[in-house]
Image: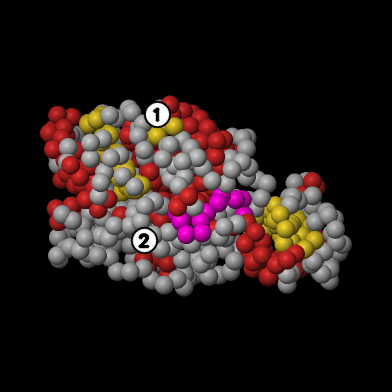
């Protein structure tokens, strides 16, 4: 992902110091069902390559990697993003712990008895309802510090995306890119655009995701390859994905055009959005048929009428010609299936950053399908769920403690145990698998970024965890969850998952979840 602007200096390390108490807090607004407030911003590292090098170095030093990142707002400008700036945070910016700070593995370890004494009153809060599942794990020692219904799967909501991120990274690797190709159709003048499952594809430079592959650049390649041959028809091939386009357990209110997710197709622009803008509250209007809408946008760039856009499949020869350079066809007659152009997505790790930061359900479903494709399975909801669980088992995790119907957590049929979430987080944070550690680039930071930008505000003691807790939120009607990692005052890294499935008020439930995480930060519990 090219950068032409120097980055501002990274804030100096603060040694894990807590941020100063901000002025009178303003309570975060309760968001629409599906997910809480989120930040429309790219990943934390302006260079994925740089991030990978830093991560590798940390692993070689055999330390636990838990980073806190730079404020996402300005990053949009560094990428040349022309989107409207995000609203100001409800509290002053917290002072973050160091970027990729090495946790002190020699710090005094908490004891299970002390953690239980600290958390029991909070877990019993009426704001969390009658059904609460919790697990807390010391990452360095792998000691379970707290467990309540920990091995019993419960509705995870968007904390499901932690499993999606980890399995996608394990299956594909952080540097993997998704290709959108165009090949010659069966008849002269016909072209076929083949969806490669890239949800971040943009029409032009004004897309939702900075640095995304672009249809206008793809159209330029195709025009050059076709030479004097007029383009008369555009066929849209979405055969990479199969099966239903919506998952079992999704509410009709969740699905486009006005909901939380688009129909899952192998070709779309801006994750199916009609306008390339992410709304912090409520749904993002999405196309009812994302692939055809993308095909029509592509046709317009080629000078082809929208009426000449149809769904279909590329000629059989397309797979054989996948590596043929488009320039070879310039000015010459094309053969069916001959590649005319190709654009590639940013690295997978960047796409996952966007998925986690914005809690983008559409991206999550396309990433889950990559796990299935990598395993040689069809790219459907059922196969993606099966492949994710298989990959978790392959990583030595308790995959049997997950019952998945999608990769986003929108389905109310999903079940994940807190134990599986904390063990997954601990594996990624432990440094033994650097490709998984890349996930932490995208996890929101308390009071700082993504869906936690306006969290950890009220009650005021929760502000002590701003800049220290890094976690994925989950919100459905009556369900509020939080799972992530934090650094205690003694420098120990803890993985935690708190899952409440019978809440009555989302705002008070979120504050109660934040209070549990804040207590872990402040409590030495030794």
Q: Position of residue 297 (x, y in %)?
A: 64, 66
Q: Is residue 477 left or right of residue 240?
A: left
Out of 212 and 481, give the one closest to the viewer. 481
Query: What's the magenta bit mostly, secondary-structure-wise?
Result: loop
Q: Which segment is the magenta one?
A: 256-267
**Does the segment drawn in magenta span residue 257?**
yes
Asked if residue 2 can be seen in this view, the reply is no
Give the spatial CA distance, label 1 vs label 2: 32 Å
For residue 151, say whether it is visible.
yes
- Vertical arrangement, residue 29 with respect to residue 431, above or below: below
Of 153 and 145, which appears nearest the observer?
A: 153
| Front residue (pair 197, 265) | 265
Give the number of callouts.
2
Which circle's residue, 1 or 2, is located before the other in the chain? 2
Secondary element at tag 2? loop
- Color encoding of the figure: secondary structure
Give the position of the C terminus as an image quadrant: top left
Q: Mark 1 sits on what residue?
A: 401
Q: Nearer the viewer, residue 472 or 403?
A: 403
Q: Quadrant of residue 396?
A: top left
Residue at left 18%, top 42%? Answer: 126
Quick one: label 1, few (<14), some, or many (20+) residues within 10 Å? many
* Residue 477 placement, left or right of 465: right
Where is residue 146 shown, x and y percent of the image?
A: 22, 31
Which mark identifies residue 281?
2
- The residue at the point 18 percent across, 56 percent down is 458
Residue lying furthest front in this view? 252
């Amino acid at each position: 992902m090219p950068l032409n602007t120097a980055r501002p200096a990274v804030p100096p390390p603060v040694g894990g110091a807590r941020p100063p108490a901000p002025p009178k807090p303003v309570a975060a607004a309760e968001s629409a069902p599906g997910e809480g407030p989120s930040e429309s911003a790219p990943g934390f590292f302006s260079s994925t390559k740089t991030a990978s090098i830093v991560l590798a170095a940390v692993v070689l030093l055999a330390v636990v990697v838990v980073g806190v990142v730079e404020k996402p707002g300005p990053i949009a400008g560094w990428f040349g993003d022309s989107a409207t700036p995000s609203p100001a945070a409800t509290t002053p910016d917290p002072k973050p712990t160091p970027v990729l700070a090495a946790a002190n593995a020699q710090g005094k370890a908490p004891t299970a008895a002390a953690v239980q004494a600290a958390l029991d009153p909070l877990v019993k809060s009426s704001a969390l309802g009658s059904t609460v599942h919790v697990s807390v794990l010391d990452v360095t020692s792998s000691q379970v510090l707290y467990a309540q219904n920990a091995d019993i799967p419960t509705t995870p909501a968007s904390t499901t995306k932690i499993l999606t991120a980890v399995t996608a990274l394990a299956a594909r690797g952080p540097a993997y890119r998704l290709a959108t190709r165009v090949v010659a159709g069966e008849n002269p003048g016909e072209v076929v655009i083949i969806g490669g499952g890239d949800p971040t594809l943009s029409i032009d430079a004004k897309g939702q995701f900075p640095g995304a592959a672009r249809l206008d650049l793809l159209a330029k390649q195709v025009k050059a390859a076709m030479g004097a041959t007029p383009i008369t028809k555009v066929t849209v091939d979405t055969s990479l994905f199969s099966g239903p386009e919506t998952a079992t357990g999704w509410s009709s209110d969740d699905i486009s055009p006005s909901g939380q997710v688009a129909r899952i197709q192998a070709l779309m622009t801006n994750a199916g959005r009609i306008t390339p803008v992410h709304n912090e509250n409520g749904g993002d209007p999405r196309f009812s048929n994302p692939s055809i809408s993308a095909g029509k946008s592509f046709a317009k760039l080629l000078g082809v009428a929208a009426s000449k856009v149809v769904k279909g499949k590329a000629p059989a020869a397309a797979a054989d010609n996948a590596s043929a350079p488009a320039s070879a066809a310039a000015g010459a007659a094309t053969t069916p299936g001959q590649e005319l152009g190709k654009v590639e997505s940013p690295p997978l790790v960047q796409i996952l950053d966007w998925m986690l930061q914005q809690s983008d359900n559409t991206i999550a479903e396309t990433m889950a399908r990559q796990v299935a494709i990598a395993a040689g399975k069809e790219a459907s909801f059922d196969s993606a769920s099966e492949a994710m669980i298989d990959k978790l088992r392959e990583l030595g995790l308790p995959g049997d403690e997950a019952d998945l119907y999608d990769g986003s957590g929108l389905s109310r049929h999903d079940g994940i145990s807190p134990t599986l979430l904390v063990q997954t987080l601990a594996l990624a944070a432990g440094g033994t698998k650097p490709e998984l550690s890349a996930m932490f680039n995208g996890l929101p930071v308390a009071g700082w970024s993504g869906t936690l930008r306006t969290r950890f505000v009220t009650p005021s003691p929760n502000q002590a965890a701003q800049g220290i807790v890094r976690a994925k939120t989950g919100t459905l009607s009556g369900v509020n969850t939080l799972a992530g990692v934090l650094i205690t005052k003694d420098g120990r890294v803890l993985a935690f998952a708190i899952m409440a499935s019978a809440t009555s008020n989302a705002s008070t439930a979120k504050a109660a979840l934040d209070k549990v995480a804040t207590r872990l930060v402040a409590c030495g519990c030794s």
